[in-house]
Image: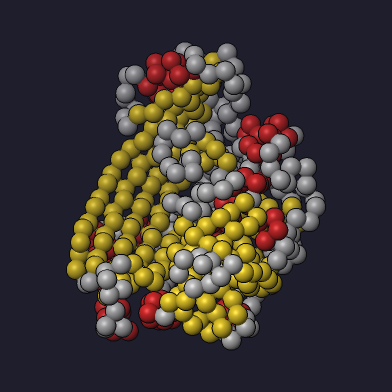
Amino acid sequence: MKTLLEKALKVSDSAEIYERKVQSTSISILLGEVQGIESEKKTEISLRIVKDGKLGAAIATDRNDDTLVSRALISLTHQKSEAEPFPNTPISEVESYSEIVKEMTTETLVASAFDLVERFKTLAKEVAFGVEVSRTFKTVSMVNSEGLDASYDYSNVEVGIYTLNEKGFYNASRSFSGADFPVITDEDLLGMFREHQLDDHEVTLGNERLPVVFSGSVMGALMLRVVGGVSGANVTKGISPVTDKLGQKVFSELLTIRDDGRLPLGLNTCAFDDEGTPAQNTMVYENGVLKNYLLSVGHAKKLGMKPTGNAIKRALFSKEIEDAPTVFETNLIVEGPMTDDEALIRGIKRGLYITGVMGAHTGNINQGEFSMNISSGFLIENGELVGKVKGAMIAGNIYELFNEVEALGTKKEPMRGIFYLMGYSPMVKFREVSIVGK
């Protein structure tokens, strides 16, 4: 990498090389039979150069690509925005990978998946089901002309389990993810089977306001709006609802939200972000009070603050090497006073428990607005799940909704935003949410 850096510096004022080597394997099992095994191994390289205050970039799959520097120069000539200096802050180690996952072969991954299949058969022989397991291991390295020379390893295993109804369509599901192989308990499986059985008990709702419990996984659809609000890009543009509200109470005092890029064996744990800023544990909201924004190098400079290690090569619908570093979460964590999950549900006379939504990307995300179809939800009556809700939507704004928090559960689940897992949340109960029904 240093040879390529030296070559880039011959035609630029400063330069950065970002490289990631990725190995991934995915397995799909349906009704106890392997449907497919896919593997991929790739190297991705991104070069960013600064010349005369402008930034240029190019990507390649080989360090020896002779066109990489020239393509970055061509890119530079079409840029008008001012480039920021590359950082060189000391990087400390993080626990971002599992040695077991690193050494895991396709054979051991298949064996682990079939262990889960056998547990399915034991607990619910009559239920049709599927299992999807993916394993990723990557090494991320970065050098720049300011003296940064760092790397870290990353591992992730994601397990998705689901049941099928009599017509062969997806029914109940669960997902688990982390740097290590996730622990899946019998209670996790039995809870999914209970939801599966409710598919035969269809209920409809009218237009009403009800207490609503969002599962930990579905909280991701709401947290997309939280991230949009505290993104440095939106704050510096003045289009965030929380611009100039640092130190003010914005959400319920029951709600604490932090972004922990250093979380041991987390979903998105990293030693540094994709600009080279060290990963941090950033308190975003503490007891409802806004404490920090999530900032890249450029946004931090504009606000007179420090970058938070949240510049990620990602876009809303992609996570590719060519994506420019943009402010996103690492491991977003929702915390607060805890209530036993079952007790939380038992305390509701009539309400809604939501485990799946469609349309998380719709509405004005940066302003906190949401309007989503309920793809998987259950009516609660007298503390029991009594039926599966069909044909209903939820709508509102998180800056109102997050002041309606009444309780948080105990068990944290991986939150899914749209296509990516974004952190962990327990189930959260809100006092009232607008339901659009039939």
Residue beneath the point at 52% across and 41% down: 312
Q: Position of residue 212 (x, y in %)?
A: 60, 71
Residue beneath the point at 29% across and 56% down: 26
Residue beneath the point at 59% across and 32% down: 87
Q: Nearer the viewer, residue 278 or 429?
A: 429
Q: Is residue 136 above or below residue 342?
A: above
Q: Is residue 133 above or below residue 64?
A: below
Left or right: residue 144 compared with residue 99: right
- Decide if residue 205 is in sight here: yes
Split into 4 quadrants, where in the image is the N terminus? top left
Which residue of the protein is positioned furthest toward the bottom in this rendering? 382
Residue beneath the point at 46% across and 79% down: 387
Q: Nearer the viewer, residue 350 or 96?
A: 350
- Decide if residue 217 is in sight here: no
Which residue of the protein is positioned furthest toward the front in this rendering? 438
Q: How is the image coloured?
A: secondary structure
Q: Position of residue 382 (x, y in %)?
A: 59, 86
Q: Position of residue 214 (x, y in %)?
A: 56, 68
Left or right: residue 38 compared with residue 374: left
Number of numbered labels in the structure image = 0
Q: Position of residue 390 (x, y in %)?
A: 45, 69
Which residue of the protein is positioned furthest toward the right in this rendering? 248
Q: Is residue 402 above or below residue 124?
A: above
Q: Nearer the viewer, residue 217 or 430?
A: 430
Q: Nearer the viewer, residue 315 or 284?
A: 315
